[in-house]
Image (cartoon, coloured by chain):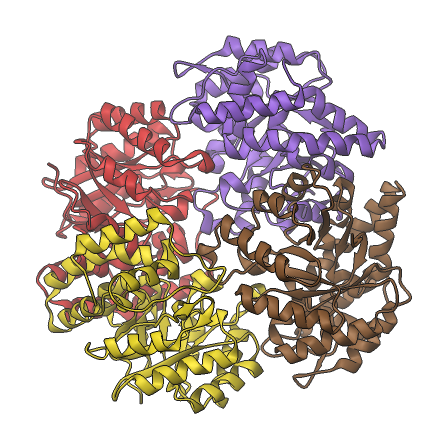
Chain colours: A yellow, B red, C purple, D brown
Amino acid sequence: MVDLAGIFPPLVTPFKNEELALDMLKNNVQRYQTFALRGYVVLGSNGERVMLNEKESLQVIETVAENAGENKLVIFGAGEESVQGTVRFLKNAARVGGQAALLITPHYYRSQMKPEVIFNFYTQVAEASPVPIVIYNVPANTGLEVPLEVVTRLAEHPNIIGMKDSSGNLTYQQSILGRNLPNFQLLTGTANTLMSSLVVGAVGGILALANILPAQCIQIYEWVKAGEFEKARHLQLQIVPLNKMITAIFGIGGLKFAMNHLGLQGGETRSPLPAPDEPARKNILGELQRLGITSV
Amino acid sequence: MVDLAGIFPPLVTPFKNEELALDMLKNNVQRYQTFALRGYVVLGSNGERVMLNEKESLQVIETVAENAGENKLVIFGAGEESVQGTVRFLKNAARVGGQAALLITPHYYRSQMKPEVIFNFYTQVAEASPVPIVIYNVPANTGLEVPLEVVTRLAEHPNIIGMKDSSGNLTYQQSILGRNLPNFQLLTGTANTLMSSLVVGAVGGILALANILPAQCIQIYEWVKAGEFEKARHLQLQIVPLNKMITAIFGIGGLKFAMNHLGLQGGETRSPLPAPDEPARKNILGELQRLGITSV
Amino acid sequence: MVDLAGIFPPLVTPFKNEELALDMLKNNVQRYQTFALRGYVVLGSNGERVMLNEKESLQVIETVAENAGENKLVIFGAGEESVQGTVRFLKNAARVGGQAALLITPHYYRSQMKPEVIFNFYTQVAEASPVPIVIYNVPANTGLEVPLEVVTRLAEHPNIIGMKDSSGNLTYQQSILGRNLPNFQLLTGTANTLMSSLVVGAVGGILALANILPAQCIQIYEWVKAGEFEKARHLQLQIVPLNKMITAIFGIGGLKFAMNHLGLQGGETRSPLPAPDEPARKNILGELQRLGITSV
Amino acid sequence: MVDLAGIFPPLVTPFKNEELALDMLKNNVQRYQTFALRGYVVLGSNGERVMLNEKESLQVIETVAENAGENKLVIFGAGEESVQGTVRFLKNAARVGGQAALLITPHYYRSQMKPEVIFNFYTQVAEASPVPIVIYNVPANTGLEVPLEVVTRLAEHPNIIGMKDSSGNLTYQQSILGRNLPNFQLLTGTANTLMSSLVVGAVGGILALANILPAQCIQIYEWVKAGEFEKARHLQLQIVPLNKMITAIFGIGGLKFAMNHLGLQGGETRSPLPAPDEPARKNILGELQRLGITSV
């Protein structure tokens, strides 16, 4: 059983003049090695997976796998609209070092994605996958939510080990946790609910914010585990505004700008994803200053 | 300064053959007196405020105010679409014993409810109100959310003392709490997030579920305050399914059915609000049984 | 059988310093008498029905009924959340001259408004109503749509004569029209689809725009009836931008401003409904000028 | 200037045991040659573009281009999330016979798709594209709408020749048509609004329904052009229920089932897209029977 407990940054994929910059990615991973992270997610939503072709995707996984260091789990984002394409990619990804797949729901044909269709998709992929599957629920991108009954049934599959929920919906998360699904681990997908999700039973988080504030994300995680709730609460409330900026408000361009400012190598986004404009940059810098963060 | 810390049931308004049944309401309040509730909310969404005419509304407030007992705060739901109508009602409500107003946002002209319009509405009403105001954010009913900047500005008004947030959105709640607004108290409006909201700084809750599980709601509140998080978590996860049934799924008809089953006097809803059908009743009874709840 | 074929303006309710200005309303109706309108709608969404108390509402109906002139149908907006309150109002409205009721769906408890509940509401009200009922579907305000199957079943009721659909959704309208419901007339509720709706079989429209451009709305109606499609198309495309301004964009405040500018007496809105700001006023005046409209 | 006036079926892509069945596709195109269609759209939403890899996509374009016959325009669906990937595909598609690109908006990072970002995407792709571009607005799949101002600005680009709008929103379509954009042609993307859209100025349609009712779709088109509105209206109202079934309700699986029933070769969908279940099949057959359609 793969243990998912802890904090993962969903690594950004740096570009330079529209081209993949693997050296920058490698550099970032090496910088993160000093932190007590559980591992890395590559090719998640923050990793611009949908901007890459398959060859590039595999290079990204391979680069991170080679530099991750021991005991760091390398989860890779996946999920084409078809079962066939998804399985093919999973096999290739496993070959270059991917250890578990974060599998998004198909969603282009949203109105056709009935519960049974979603169940079938995950089951067929899990049957064929060489690596364990983590369900990825991200309504802001997909426009749909994996239904609770589907999660419950999928949790019984031996090759489905957990779920990343980026909805920020505590009712949804608690509905899953309350079922006490054996061998099924829940990760929050947003730092906005890091403390709340941990308190009700999530085992960790895959957090965009952990790209720039790894120490603080880990600190909240450890304080909650240690029962230091007042400390955790104080820090948690402090990070929400910055997290909103680098996710919902300014997006990946904002996150990469913050990384570059803090001495990491976020690089650029691939077009048409925008870079933050001057007021956006000011807002992000102001928030970093308020938090006293000057480097990673 | 009125202290809002604690648990409030938003009392249902019992009907019998479409007519107000004040004796049943009185009976319920008397039953609740044995619990360490902070007070009562009358004429909230669960109180079918929108089904009553003004005369009936005032009778409901008066009945609860007369039977509330000492030290129980009586908050009443209010909020017409116009400032004028709202103020008139607030004055009448205060005269019959209402101690604070839970004030919903105007929402019929949703597309016109720009931040400045919402700000003006609350400010104008607060200026004229004989009782303190609690902002009521309930997107499921109104289709809109009180913007954060508006909350921040309204919090400075001396006659606006807090907010009930029924969105269940922890990001929103933390964004408010992180601003450390002085003399501004946040109540969660759903038992789904009772523990999470308390953990990040809410002072209590106005909870439909407290109509039927007052002891358990109070227990979670007290465990969180005492730092007994593991106990709180266990109970919190248990109550979510029942809470969803008597709110989002089966609504007030479901809540009243559960009350009647547990020895309270929920009575009937007013048409066209439906009573639960046979499968719904079975679901509710099954959930009560699973929780071992047989009476209040 | 009441004939609904033609154009109706949903009359605004003028206020002056927050108070009802019935003289201004009377003046407007008298001005409209020179146009070949089918009748008037009072207390619709544009009539700020939700801003009025019952006494004021009845005064508005009475004022219009007394000044409507022969052969003009006076439809009044209605629809409380409860059957009881709705029926009581309908009886009072009929007494002061209201000839048909435009009946909005209950919507505060949106998640409970299942098809059967909506069906029951309309049926119970229609049974008790002294005047014929027009179903009012207005998702932008209510957040819900009257389901097609419910419309089909309601159309069989002898006291339900038609529907105003403000969704602008031609698929929905054609789905109703394709069923050839006998004695059931469809009115479009937005000038945005006036021509399209007429072309597929609507009998007319209740149009905010008809408050300021009655001649043009009637002209499109008559051209479509006469088979002058090219002329109708040209005018129809011209009016859409102005119609969007005085409905979705600037709302009733915008509409009243335009009326005042054109020599009618729109008066003011009741708080908190906003008046248009300077840029909004410029936009409206620019659009009126582009259309060459200087008075009504 | 490429003329888009007329009816296009967005061809389905037949699969057999999950594999591309190009012979079936070829067969369908040959069957369609007897109809006065303006051309074909391949790899649209109905063509399961997102289920294919690039090699398969190019085979599909090539197969249709080789069999389309003279004077039939071959438009191909395109639009990756990145400019780079999109341009590369367009060049390859043009090489195998694609004559114009139907270009969907990037949408995975919905919250980042601000007007300027969408404008930049289309402009950069149009600059580099060897074939003319048709903007594809399909909110049901993308969760976003191309803003009117963006359409207006894009319409000035010499390599952007028009738009397919699948929103069914007549207000949106008329807002575009009312601007009289030179050299910019609007196609409706749903048979639900075929007549309405044509009446207000659209030049034709790309219609899933034209896969199974090509004669009827062409008939409506020609009747509207000939001013035979009453005939057009009658047929238009008849087709809406079937069109809803093979689009919003049962999706591509439903459409393929209907094709197979009518003697075409729809084949199967690729997993996880579902085939219609027994009740769905009955509904579709019932609707075909009601319309008297037994073959294509």
Q: Is residue D6 left or right of residue B62?
A: right
Towards the viewer: A17 or C126: A17
Question: Residue D109 location in percent, x, y?
Answer: 46, 61
Question: Residue A66 location in percent, x, y?
Answer: 34, 87
Towards the viewer: B229 or D97: D97
User: Residue at position x 46%, y 63% from top?
Assistant: A141
User: Residue at position x 36%, y 72% from top?
Assistant: A164
**Residue B280 seen anywhere in this rendered image of the structure:** yes
Residue located farthest toward the left when viewing the structure as drawn: B226
Towards the viewer: B18 or B189: B189
Q: How many numbered markers are drawn?
A: 0
Residue C130: quarter of image: top right
Residue located farthest toward the front when viewing the structure as drawn: A17
User: Residue at position x 69%, y 58% from top?
Assistant: D244
Question: Residue A19 location in percent, x, y?
Answer: 46, 71
Indicate whether D57 appears above or below B162: below
Indicate whether A170 appears above or below A206: above
Image quarter (top left, top right, bottom left or bottom right) of the N terminus of chain A: bottom left
User: Residue at position x 14%, y 58% from top?
Assistant: A234
Question: Residue B183 location in percent, x, y?
Answer: 13, 40
Indicate whether C272 appears above or below C145: above
Image quarter (top left, top right, bottom left or bottom right) of the C terminus of chain A: bottom left
Residue A162: quarter of image: bottom left
Q: Is residue D193 left or right of residue D67?
A: left
Indicate whether C58 appears above or below B220: above
**Residue B254 seen anywhere in this rendered image of the structure:** no
